[in-house]
Image (cartoon, rainbow, N blue to C red):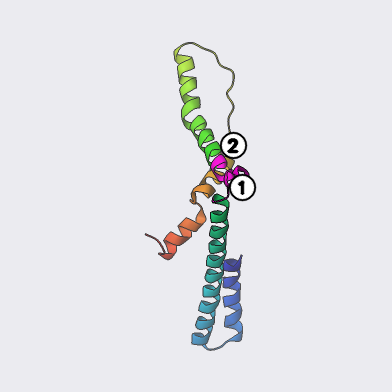
Amino acid sequence: MLTALIGPVSNLLGKFIEDKDMKNKLAHEVATMAENHAQELAKGQLEINKAEASHKSIFVAGWRPFVGWTCGIALAWHFVLQPLIMFLSVLFGFTLPELPAFDMGSLMTVLMGMLGLGGLRTYEKQKGLTK
């Protein structure tokens, strides 16, 4: 949300501050402040993740593996098992009812989020933060 405000704030600076150097300096400070805030939020989430993962209760520490295994099983069903079953049934002359299909859009959203392959990784690459 803060990054969406950087552009309008920079435009406002241009209207009220004549000195280009001062305007650029302030715009850079606003952008840096937004990036620092995002990093602090990410660090806080990492600490929460560590605390959850080290918890002894399966209901606290077990939800991520459960969601991961559920996504993995659904992915394997959709891309490996279902086509293989359909192929073998046709090959051996069996008639099967319509097999269930998953909403792969929702599944991939959850899976990519868990794997950390969302837009943040693209952002890091564009900014040159990772190789």
**Front-most of 117 and 62?**
62
Looking at the magenta stretch, what is its main secondary structure?
helix
> Which residue is under mark 2?
103
Which residue is at a point 41% across and 64% down the rendered structure image?
129
Q: Secondary structure at mark 1?
A: helix
Which residue is at a point 53% across and 55% down the rendered structure image?
50
Q: Earlier in the sequence, mark 2 or mark 1?
A: 1
Is residue 129 found left or right of 82 in the rendered image?
left
Q: Which residue ends up furthest to the left in the rendered image?
A: 131
Which residue is at a point 47% across and 56% down the rendered structure image?
121
Magenta highlight range: 54-67
Q: Which residue ends up furthest to the top in the rendered image?
A: 93
Please identify the quadrant where the C terminus is shown: bottom left
Q: Secondary structure at mark 2?
A: loop
Res 105 quadrant in image: top right
Q: Position of residue 79 (x, y in %)?
A: 48, 32
**Front-most of 77 and 8?**
77
Is residue 129 found left or right of 43 in the rendered image?
left
Task: Look at the picture and state if 33 lies above or below 75.
Answer: below
Say what amino acid the circle numbered 1 marks: Val
Q: CA distance from mark 2 to mark 1?
A: 27 Å
Q: Position of residue 48 (x, y in %)?
A: 58, 57
Task: Look at the picture and state if 98 lies above or below 2.
Answer: above
Q: Position of residue 61 (x, y in %)?
A: 57, 47
> Which residue is under mark 1?
60
Mark 1 Cα shell of 10 Å, populated few (<14), some (14-19), many (≥20): few
